[in-house]
Amino acid sequence: MGEVLDFGGLAILHGARKEVAKVEFTLRDIKDQRIQCCLYGKLAEIFDHQVKPNNGDICLIRNAKVGCFKGEMQVTNSFDSSLVLINPDITEAHALKRMFIGQGDNVDANQLHNINILTHQKRLKWSESPFKTIQEMKRTNQGELCRVICAVYVVDTSTGWYYCACVVCNNMVSKQAICFDEVYVPKWWCNFCQRFLSKVTPRYKLDLLVQDETGESRFSLQDSVSATMVKLGASRVVDVYSAEFEVEEMLPPEIVAIVGKNYGFGVSVDEINKASGVDKISAMKVWDINDIMWKYFKSLHQQESYSSKKHSTGPVCIEKDARDEPNDDKSG
Ligand SMILES: [Zn+2]
């Protein structure tokens, strides 16, 4: 932890394989000892775009990495697992702030503001979300989480199964043909960064049509979830620089392999549209069938021991539930 000095703003590093954002600044501690800091990646962008620290702010870095750069000690973030706090509300930070204000820095101590940058996503506790059939899932409230065991029967490629993302901001980019020395070279335009890129990275966006014995639905999977399912990152499957998969309806064998298989999905019910029949459901987690069956039986066992302890009927297992209900939604 220390006071931010000479904060320099965002810079883009052009590495051999990709471009990385970074911010550099100096931190000084209460003994006026100074250390160079350099944040990389997404954290650097958030730091620059959203936090916009001023010199004189107190900065605390958790899970920092200490390394050596050009013979000097340097603090960096271990990518997105580090936590950076500006003006944290702790005694040490207040003491530090008071001390530097005492040295003539004209910062109003009352203006201390807390900004927490949390780059790691809140871990979802899937073990606490219920198992549901597709029919039951469609009756849950918007925004609820549940686990569904079902089979993938189609990968819908009508809107493509991958997109190209900016290596700096991760937003979707659009391909532009640029004539350079009378040769067309592929270039991409990032609307967020407002610049042309020659390096992009592919990301999956899979739309899966799924079914179980009670009904069917459509699950959308983001890149990281898709990659677990396909067992390969998108960049290993698509070569964005060649035109091999220019036709996005063409599926590589790695993705074809998931069709017909059963999986467990951790889903968030974003929107159930009874009128159009088009559901908006995000699968945020995927388990292979052995893994999910083990979790399923474990949860059944927990429910049984819970209900026997309470001497009441307690929660009933979902298979029984599904049989008890009229199966009017069934289609296909
Ligand atoms: Zn960008």
Image (cartoon, helix red, strand yellow):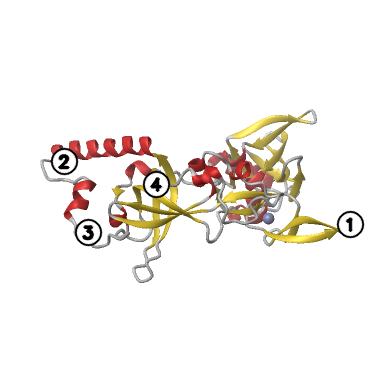
**For the residues marked 1 and 2, what is the alpha-carbon distance in whole angstroms?**
75 Å
> Which of pointers 3 and 4 indicates the residue nearer the eye?
3
Q: Which residue is mark 4?
A: 265
* Mark positioned earlier in the residue sequence (1 or 4): 1
Q: Amino acid at mark 4?
A: Phe
Name the residue: 52% across, 38% down: 231
Residue mark closest to the camera, 3 vs 2: 3
Give the spatial CA distance, label 4 vs label 2: 26 Å
Amino acid type at image mark 2: Ser
Q: Nearer the viewer, residue 160 or 55?
A: 160
Provide residue 113's location: percent of width, then percent of height.
57, 53
Label 3 and label 2: CA atoms lie apart by 27 Å
Reading the image, the residue beneath label 3 is 327
Per the image, the residue denoted by label 2 is 307
Instruction: Please state which of the two labelled residues, at mark 1 or mark 4, is closer to the viewer.
Output: 1
Q: Amino acid at mark 3?
A: Asn
- Packing grade of label 2 (10 A; few <14, some 14-19, many >=20) is some
For marks 3 and 4, the one nearer the N-term is: 4
Based on the displayed image, in which of its 4 quarters is residue 185 positioned? bottom right
Q: Residue at x 59, y 56 (%)?
A: 248
Whichever of callouts 3 and 2 sits on the residue coming sooner in the sequence is: 2
Q: Residue at the bottom extreme?
A: 275
Q: Quadrant of the C terminus?
A: bottom left
Dot 3 falls on a residue whose secondary structure is loop
Secondary structure at badge 4 equals: strand
Q: Where is residue 297 drawn, in percent x and y?
A: 27, 36
Q: Tags 3 and 2 in contact by the CB under 8 Å rule?
A: no
Residue underneath mark 1: 181
